[in-house]
Image: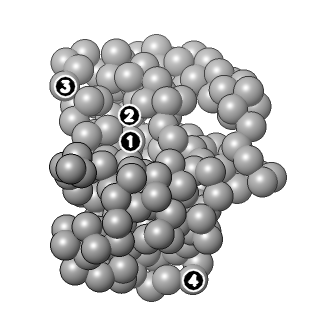
Amino acid sequence: MTEKVSRDDYFTAAFELLAAGGKSALTTTAVCRRIGMTTGSLYHHFGSGAAFYRAVIDYWENDVTVAQRRRVDAVADPRERLATLEQAAREADHEVEKAIRSWAMADRYVAAAQQRVDQVRHEHLTKHYIEAGFTPARADTLARIGFSILVGAQQFGTRVDHKRLNSALDEYSAWVNSSVSAEVTTSH
């Protein structure tokens, strides 16, 4: 008797494959092999391979990304929220993010989702910088710089260098934190 699997099991396997080998590693056969199921089971859950790939992207956009935002939004203090944002950036699965960005270059559906996620993340980050005391213009700039550090680290080389990413985030965080007090003092 086969063990029951959920849609989430398929998504977990998909993200593992994306992280390990990019979109080319993400096949319905590889996903099914990874979780010990047949492709018939995948088709039962999703209808087709194309529908499965769309569901993976929808899950990333509507579940994974939303969960990251909720984690940050649950923190009451604006400055602590910035620290939580930084921690979330460090803990993100950058190999999956890198693979999705690469996939977006060849697939309009993925590209549209990527653009929406980028926009939402930028707005979310900007909002939290404003709540921490930065002017809207400065908050927008800080959000763009921080976001650029993450995307840049994801695009450098064949694998994300977490040590260098963390060093860049350390520098960025020190710079932002040294600006928080000055910005709050001069804007009030």
Residue 112 placement: quadrant:
bottom left
Q: Can you tell which of label 2 and label 3 is closer to the viewer? A: 3
Q: Can you tell which of label 1 and label 3 is closer to the viewer? A: 3
Residue 6's spot in the image, x, y percent? 20, 52
Q: Specify the amino acid type for callout 4.
A: Ala
Q: Specify the amino acid type for callout 2.
A: Tyr
Does residue 89 appear anywhere in the picture?
A: yes
Give how far apart the Cα atoms at labels 3 and 4 are. Answer: 36 Å
Residue 126's spot in the image, x, y percent? 38, 44
Instruction: Look at mark 3 in the image and give the residue it sits on.
Output: 74
Rate crowding at label 4 as few (under 14), some (14 to 19) or many (20 or more) other CA atoms within 10 Å: few
Q: Is residue 66 left or right of residue 165?
A: left
Give how far apart the Cα atoms at labels 2 and 1 are. Answer: 6 Å
The numbered mark, 2 or 3, whose residue comes first in the sequence reads: 3
The residue sitting at 36% across, 82% down in the picture is: 50
Give how far apart the Cα atoms at labels 4 and 1 are. Answer: 28 Å
Circles 4 and 1 in contact, beta carbons < 8 Å: no
Residue 124 placement: quadrant:
top left
Circles 1 and 3 in contact, beta carbons < 8 Å: no
Instruction: Look at mark 2 in the image and give the residue it sits on.
Output: 129
Q: Specify the amino acid type for callout 1.
A: Leu
Under circle 2, the secondary element is helix
The numbered mark, 4 or 1, whose residue comes first in the sequence reads: 4
Instruction: Look at mark 1 in the image and give the residue it sits on.
Output: 125
Q: Can you tell which of label 4 and label 2 is closer to the viewer? A: 4
Name the one closer to the observer, 112 or 26: 26
Quadrant containing the C terminus is: top left
Residue occupying the far right of the picture: 157
Circles 2 and 1 in contact, beta carbons < 8 Å: yes
Circles 3 and 4 in contact, beta carbons < 8 Å: no
The residue sitting at 22% across, 80% down in the picture is: 47
Under circle 1, the secondary element is helix
